[in-house]
Image (tube, rainbow, N blue to C red):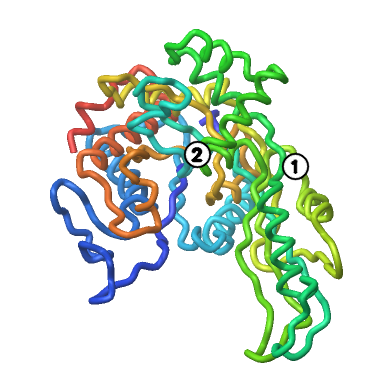
Amino acid sequence: MSLKPVLFVSHIDVVPATEGVSSEWSKPPFGGEIFDNFIYGRGAMDLKFMVIALLEAVTELLKSGWTRPERTLYLAFGHDEEVGGDRGAGAMASLLASRGVTLDFVVDEGGPILVDGLPLLLRTPIQIALVGTAEKGFNSVIANVSGKGGHAMAPPTDHSTVPASMSALVLSVDQHPPATHLVPPVTHFMKALAPACPNPVLRFVLSHCENRFLGYLLAKLLARSSANTAAVVRTTVGVTRMNAGTADNVLPDTGAVLFNFRLLPGHSLNYPLQYLQKHLSGKVKLQQAGGQKARKATPVSSPFNEQFDIVARAIYETVHPEQGIVVAPHLMTGASDSRHYLDITANGVYRFFPLFMNLTAGDVSRVHGIDERIKVDDFLQAIKVYIRMIQLACGDRNVSSGTDIGQT
């Protein structure tokens, strides 16, 4: 086989869910119950559905007599993605590297299919399939604050306590977030949406988003629209921990604030330190936090190559909503196991799963939340998408869209 292998990635681990009488779930979180055409359970959206859909897709292909793929197909299912993936995907990537394997491209979890589209940008209900071509970076920094302690019966009135200094720092960061920037793959996303936009003025703006002035305006608009859209146009910073004090009647003389940054492509690991320095006053020292290893944003995979086209074509050939659908490159604000395979991948990582999500209906809150669920019909459709994607990836470019194979 002359073609390099292709790898499909998923994970079998899930985040915790409360069971028993204290649970807020309407169905047992680990029961896998089907009710009113929905499959309920932890992992129904993140990410056991993808594992099962991939296995069903391969099973259907084998049952159909499909036995001569033109390249090797790998399936890699990690067991610790939710806590970094070092022992799962990290170990599997190391094993493949030790065997001298170079992958052509990788398909992992990532962007879903937005069934209610993005009316803010398109003014039309067309569905959007988001294919992640990059992930933001990750870095956590601790601000250690020191000051004068003392007895709590007579606290100072000049706002000089350690908690006051911590609060002032957090407020300054909250009121002056990092600047907005429109960078690839967000510019690729805008340009992909442009042909579907019925408004000629907005279509022109989207098509020319790389123009400095128009890009600036678009970034400002997105930053003010929602937390999710703001996260793709700036490096975000969030306070995830604050610690100070040891007793009820003692003013603390030390405290710590942990800032978690999600870095835009192009920002270095030093950016958080440089940014926080502008907000410091008093006795504050910055240090790199432990825990997850700091990492820059991943390289941006091309949305203009054969590999991206395989993913896009599989979607277009199997998903046919009445209002239409557009496939668009996307910047992932979270992380996936795919980053572990970057060093052994030649032609890009594409982060997409055929999960049909309705933002208006609040589907996002179900991921890692209460009553995680997926429609039975959507799960069956996901299998068909993967059947076609595997066919295309493994050389069967002229096979039908898989409806004869994927009647699952």
Marks 1 and 2 sit apart, C-alpha to C-alpha, by 21 Å
Residue at horizontal 53%, vertical 22%? 306
Mark 1 residue crowding within 10 angstroms, few (<14) / some (14–19) / many (20+): some
Quadrant location, the C terminus: top left
Q: How many marks?
A: 2
Report the mark closest to the observer, 1 or 2: 1
Is 323 on the left-hand or right-hand side of 76? Answer: left
Q: What residue type is labelled 2?
A: Arg
* Towards the viewer: 91 or 299: 299
Residue 267, labelled with which disc? Answer: 1
Residue at horizontal 58%, vertical 29%? 221
Is 85 on the left-hand or right-hand side of 28? Answer: right
Which of pointers 1 and 2 lies earlier in the amino acid sequence? 1
Mark 2 residue crowding within 10 angstroms, few (<14) / some (14–19) / many (20+): many
Is residue 349 visible in the rendered image? The answer is no
Figure check: 14 above or below 4: below
Secondary structure category for the residue under label 1: loop
Residue 350: x percent and y percent? 52, 36
Residue 340: x percent and y percent? 60, 51
Figure check: 360 above or below 77: above
Residue 170: x percent and y percent? 69, 60
* Residue assigned mark 2: 351
Q: What residue type is labelled 1?
A: His
Is 70 on the left-hand or right-hand side of 346? Answer: left
Is residue 311 visible in the rendered image? The answer is yes
* Towards the viewer: 249 or 272: 249
In which image quadrant can residue 250 be found? bottom right
